[in-house]
Image (cartoon, helix red, strand yellow):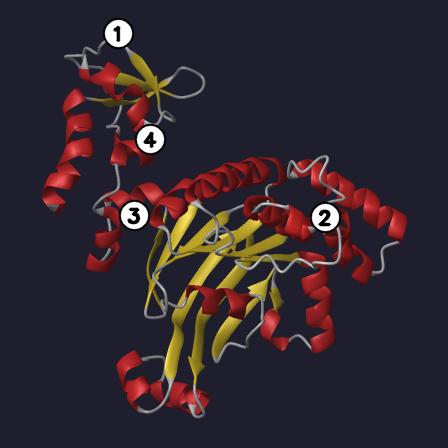
Amino acid sequence: MTDAVIKCESVYKIFGVNAKKMLEEANGNVDAKTFQEKGCIVGVNNASFEVSKGEMLVVMGLSGSGKSTLLRCISRLTDATGGKIFIEGQDLLSLKEKELIELRRNKMGMVFQSFALLPHKTVLENIAFPLLVKGVETENSINKAMDMVKLVGLDGRENYFPRELSGGQQQRVGIARSLAVEPDIWFLDEPFSALDPLIRKEMQDEFLRLQEKLKKTIMFITHDFDEALKLADRIAIMKDGIIEQLDTPAKIVLNPATEYVKKFTEEVPREKVLIIEDVMDAPTSDNLSNLKVSKDEIIENVAEKILSQEKSVGVVDKNNKIVGTVHPSKIIHTVFGGRKENS
């Protein structure tokens, strides 16, 4: 990636009195169990990756995997024990307190699981609050906050207090508040996990709509693999502070790198996740069916049509040019083969 907005190089976060000294002595080879025996807890272990402009990287893992700790290191809500972190080429760990505050105010937006709304302020006042802290004039702050109200679909509720809103509506206020300062980088730490399943799905759809419009650079933390698959451009799966695999959702489902990652993918309905491009073969001049399907089509949407053919089906791009082929047997293997292997 050449346009990295976030770049981490061998980032470690180790909790404990002798953490820094032990890290230096380990020479980068950190064993969590050994460190724990000596009174240290490894939160993040040798994390190296980049997030490009406009990309949504979803970091997932079970409780205690280190995903939230990693996010806190990158936002410098906690200081990394070792490694380097760059935000748009700027060395984050070298910034003084005042420079860090400026970076957070002008470049970063944060949304957490707890809504953290001010109970005595209205929706509009909650959203305008960070702008007022920045020194923006009251009238301009209110106007901007009103734009955000419309953006997240809370028109008509701008004068409500948090107690008068549902959980999903409160979360929308939190999202609107973080967007009001127009951050280039957006950090979200399990923002939907406190919501019931139906509202959670609605918020995921809303979030995708916002991202389609705003094109933010996003790190999104979740423990829900289905949520990760739905939202991510790429997924980083963590275990015991280590990034086990970082790849596109399709590649993780098709080629899990470790047994731990494989466990997450076993029950995934592949046809709902993968697109035709993920499973197509190279284009061929052989006799093809009259049917053509788009390379961007989700397999589930066209599986029945393909399975009704005897010959391979041509796969086309947006210009209707054939870029590959897919045989009905490939669809059968993709949908059922992985499950059979896993079982």
Q: Which residue is mark 2?
A: 123
* Neighbourhood count class around disc 3 (C-alpha, 10 Å): few under 14, some 14–19, many 20 upward: many
Mark earlier in primary sequence (1, 3) = 3
* Neighbourhood count class around disc 1 (C-alpha, 10 Å): few under 14, some 14–19, many 20 upward: few
- Nearest to the observer: residue 220 or residue 296: 220
Of tags 1 and 3, the one toward the viewer is 3
- Quadrant, the C terminus: top left
Left-right relation of 221 to 328: right
Q: Which residue is mark 4?
A: 275
The amino acid on which the numbered mark 2 sits, given as a three-letter code, is Val
State the SS at label 2: helix
Kindly check if marks 3 and 2 are in contact, taking CB atoms under 8 A apart as contact: no
Q: Position of residue 222 (x, y in %)?
A: 42, 55
Q: Position of residue 2 (x, y in %)?
A: 52, 51
Q: Position of residue 195 (x, y in %)?
A: 48, 49
Which residue is depicted at the point 79% across and 44% down? 144
Q: Which residue is mark 3?
A: 252
Which residue is depicted at the point 48% across and 75% down? 83
- On screen, residue 108 above or below 313: below
Mark earlier in primary sequence (2, 4) = 2
* Neighbourhood count class around disc 2 (C-alpha, 10 Å): few under 14, some 14–19, many 20 upward: many
The amino acid on which the numbered mark 1 sits, given as a three-letter code, is Asn
Kindly check if marks 4 and 1 are in contact, taking CB atoms under 8 A apart as contact: no
Q: Which residue is mark 1?
A: 290
Q: Quadrant of residue 273?
A: top left
Mark earlier in primary sequence (4, 1) = 4
Mark earlier in primary sequence (1, 2) = 2
Kindly check if marks 1 and 3 are in contact, taking CB atoms under 8 A apart as contact: no
Left-right relation of 308 to 193: left
